[in-house]
Image (spheres, rainbow, N blue to C red):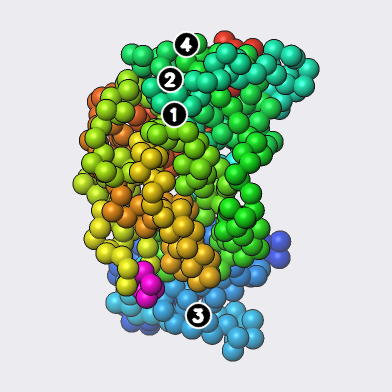
Amino acid sequence: MQLHFSPSMRSITISSSSSNGFIDLMKIKVAARHISYRTLFHTILILAFLLPFVFILTAVVTLEGVNKCSSFDCLGRRLGPRFLGRGDDSGGNGGRLAPPLHVGGDQVALVTVEISAAGLIIFYLSWVRSRFSELMNKHFAASSIPKGIHCLSLRLTDEYSSNAHARKQLPPPELLPLLSNNSYHHFILSTDNILAASVVVTSTVQSSLKPEKIVFHVITDKKTYAGMHSWFALNPVSPAIVEVKGVHQFDWLTRENVPVLEAVENHNGIRDYYHGNHVAGANLSDTTPRRFASKLQARSPKYISLLNHLRIYIPELFPNLDKVVFLDDDVVIQRDLSPLWEINLGGKINGAVETCKGDDEWVMSKHFRNYFNFSHPLIAKHLDPDECAWAYGMNIFDLRAWRKTKIRETYHSWLKENLKSNLTMWKLGTLPPALIAFKGHVHRIDPSWHMLGLGYQSNTNIESVKKAAVIHYNGQSKPWLQIGFEHLRPFWTKYVNYSNDFIRNCHILES
């Protein structure tokens, strides 16, 4: 790019080199009246300041491919009017060079301000687009399975077929009666992530004052069952008891009992919503990066997984149990949880931490209005937007009281209505229908039992994390992913046995 002055010092031309010689980008002719050298000097400084913005404009258009221009004058004709609020007049110019820009001494400043504003707008739009791209990449990273964890599942599945010890019965036959003994503390975990399951079970047992009273019921899908069984058969957590069951081993889970969930998994429109192109049809200019991130979170494929919906069927899957603690697979237990069984739920069914009492916007300031579309007449009629929400992830359930209610039927009914409305009543997974189904059945427990948000917020208070009984990495930044927060990951990795042969051979490294 070069700056040319005419011999009379009355015109300035900015040119760029190309294969065909020099192409004029801008011409400025000074009026015939006398112009001082000071004014000329200031004009040159202003033009020098503008050059970076010209480069930015060219780079943005070239990289994003929004215009098929082969010359700088075309770029100016196309993008200049657009960013300055006028229509694209390139069509009427027949592709010819733009006429020279005739300005007087006072008008140079006006041209400078307009072009500077255009440069700043381009800068901002480029930053917004890069932010959206970053959020999309993070969404894909959060939805994917890390290579090491996939390797672990495959190797353990192979071990199940070749090693009799990996296939041994869990628990041993003499301990089977304890699986329905209500004097023990029963935990339920539903997951297809073997490494995450090992951390939940290990941290619970190591933090317990009565590990011999712990019984874990681990539920997984058919494809992960062999690997999950192998892990706990080869890595016992004595004196605790672990049972591993696949969804295919529950006689109650038939199409007749879960018709809505089959529809959720097989309905093409629903599958497209969760697995399709998350940018197509989205008006990025009409949203903010924060809102876009929230929408991506709502489209996580896990929300149509049967494993994610199983929690609503706990009373039927474990008909002989009276009280259980349900845990998500992205939690770490740091304190003895046996006192949970002593909490008087006051006739309620679900002991949970409320999430409307905090200051942060992501996790602990959630009301029903954050989950439901109150412009829908059914939602507006039956729900209160200011009602406090509560959290899944660590819940104490009174199954005896639950079996006397219609919670499952209510859950199914509202899920059907949302499917009929093409997901216009709510978008986000299993919690919204549970908020409706458990309405009036929730007992608030102390927030110190369950700290949320470690997968959302990098500025989480470390001292609060250390004091919490259960820490929950809900959000995209799971501790087993590279996008996890480095300063929060050690609370999770301390329960991973990195000396285990399977973990070493799959190159799952401590970071």
Q: Earlier in the sequence, mark 2 or mark 4?
A: 2
Which residue occupies 41% across, 53% down? 407
Mark 2–mark 4 Cα distance, whole angstroms, equals 8 Å
Looking at the picture, which amino acid does disc 4 mark? Pro
Residue 202 visible in this rendered orientation of the protein = yes
Mark 1 vs mark 4: which is more N-terminal? 1
Q: Which residue matches tag 1?
A: 187
Q: Which stretch is magenta?
A: 374-380
Please report whichever mark, 1 or 3, sits nearer to the chain's N-terminal start: 3
In the rendered structure, are the residues bearing label 2 and label 3 in contact, judged by CB atoms less than 8 Å apart? no
> Residue under circle 4?
239
Q: CA distance from mark 1 to mark 4?
A: 15 Å
- Looking at the image, do the residues carrying marks 1 and 4 touch, with CB atoms under 8 Å apart? no
Q: Residues within 10 Å of mark 4 (few under 14, many from 20)?
A: few
At horizontal 46% and vertical 53% (from top left) the residue drawn is: 408
Whichever of callouts 1 and 2 sits on the residue coming sooner in the sequence is 1
Give the secondary structure at mark 2: strand
* Residue named by callout 2: 214
User: In front: mark 1 or mark 3?
Assistant: 1
Identify the secondary structure beneath mark 4.
loop
Disc on res. 100:
3
The mark nearer the N terminus, 3 or 4, is 3
Say which element carries label 1.
strand
Residue 378 belongs to the span the image colors magenta? yes
Disc nearest the viewer among 3 and 4? 4
- What amino acid type is highlighted by mark number 3? Pro
Residue type (three-letter) at the residue carrying disc 1: Phe
Image spot of residue 288 (x, y percent): 39, 60
Image x and y of residue 216, in percent: 49, 25
State if disc 3 and disc 1 touch (CB < 8 Å).
no
Residue type, label 2: Ile
Q: Quadrant of residue 185?
A: top left
